[in-house]
Image (cartoon, rainbow, N blue to C red):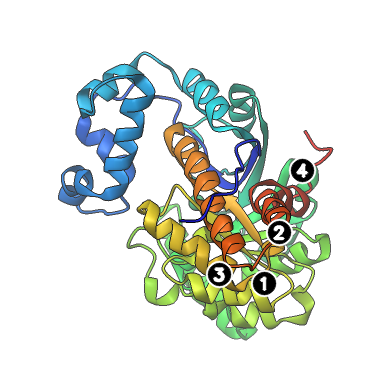
Amino acid sequence: MSAPVDLGDVQVVDNHCHSVDRRQGHREVAEWRSLFSESPDCRMRTVEVAESVFYRRLMGELALRYGVDVDETTVLEARAELDATELIRRLFGDAGIGAVVVDTGFPDPTSALGFEEIGTAGGCQAVGLLRLELVLQELVVRCATYDGLLDAVRERLTGCRDKGFVGFKSIVGYRTGLDVARWSRTEAVASFAAARHEVEAAGDVRLGHKPLLDTLLHVAFEVAAAEALPVQFHVGYGDPDADLRRANPLLLRDVLEEKAYRDMPVVLLHGCWPFVREGAYLAAVYGNAFLDLSFGIPFLSRQEMRSVTRAAMGAAPTSKLMYSSDGARVPELHWLAALDGRRLLGEVLGELVADGDLTHSDALRAGEQILRDNATTLYGLAGRR
Ligand SMILES: [Zn+2]
């Protein structure tokens, strides 16, 4: 067993996470459990999830933290008196979270804290990401003509840094697949007509019209490339709304090959799990591809997160890897991920030192890059409040 590298002093930059629900104080065990499952199946969310290694670990760690028995009702009782702000203050402080990059598209902003509130409560820097598909479908509802829509998209997305965002996030992997293609104008206009039909019938649209969505994403990528703005992609693991057969990062080849997009950093989220080796490969060969290593969601065992970290570090330069939690709705996810991420990364770095791959000072620097420095640079966090 090799000696782990101690990263205890490194404040993490959580490069991809979500906000926390305003309402905390959960007392219903079934409701609490459902926060830790991506399954739409009621029995999975409320019964089977309690048998997952992730959940057992989470509850064990929370019982330790609150000094109570490992019993769900008792643990919930111990946190129930604390409101969202107080939970964040305590947990973020304990976990050494220095900055958070928050995807503002989920959970619903009407029931969640704004990213500025997270920063204030957590005593950390907090910045936002703009979720593209939500903006695009809102503009499809508003624009009656195809050309008007293209102009509106370009206008809304241009200069987002000045509007408080440090990047875009795309969930096209959840919608029509990562194989974002080029479509003829005729195909895109027909697709727009279908989307507008939905708007007229229902007053709203869920943008799952591939020729239209792909075309609008290309507009977004042009803006991102012109402004060197990072774009995060949901890749791999998610609820079954994401068809895993269309969420392999290799499907992004056309986007990564596009010369016009070379200045657009592409961040492949949550280790692309289970396609981690594909993600590591892309980060190793494309100058603008980065691999996010998420230690909160997917809901994995420590052993599996260790192997994800090993696979990523085994192939990709450490300058292309970034820590995240992907935590959402309860701050316990952001908290446990930071503690686990720092520790597991330290262990894997220790193995690399023992193998003679890295010196101890190389390993320490790599730990700082992955936990903090790469994201600080990529999202322009230094000197920004
Ligand atoms: Zn996420």
Label 3 Cα crowd, 10 Å radius (few <14 / some 14-19 / many 20+): many
Residue at disc 2, secondary structure: loop
Visible residue check, residue 247: yes
Looking at the image, is 319 positioned above or below residue 118? below
Of callouts 2 and 4, the N-terminal one: 2
Ligand 1 contact, mark 3 (Cβ < 8 Å): no
Give how far across and how far down residue 311 sits, in percent: 51, 69
* Dot 4 amino acid type: Leu
Residue at disc 4, secondary structure: loop
* Dot 3 amino acid type: Leu
Location of mark 3 (residue) = 213
Kindly report the distance in space between the C-alpha atoms of the residues bearing marks 2 and 4: 13 Å
At a point 51% along the width and 55% down the height, the residue shown is: 2
Q: Do the residues labelled 1 and 4 touch (CB within 8 Å)?
A: no
Location of mark 4 (residue) = 381
* Dot 2 amino acid type: Pro
Location of mark 1 (residue) = 218
Kindly report the distance in space between the C-alpha atoms of the residues bearing marks 4 and 3: 30 Å
- What is the quadrant of the N terminus in the image? bottom left
* Dot 1 amino acid type: His
Location of mark 2 (residue) = 230
Label 4 Cα crowd, 10 Å radius (few <14 / some 14-19 / many 20+): some
150 or 31, nearer to the observer: 31
Visible residue check, residue 144: no
Kindly report the distance in space between the C-alpha atoms of the residues bearing marks 1 and 4: 26 Å
Residue at disc 1, secondary structure: helix
113 or 276, nearer to the observer: 276
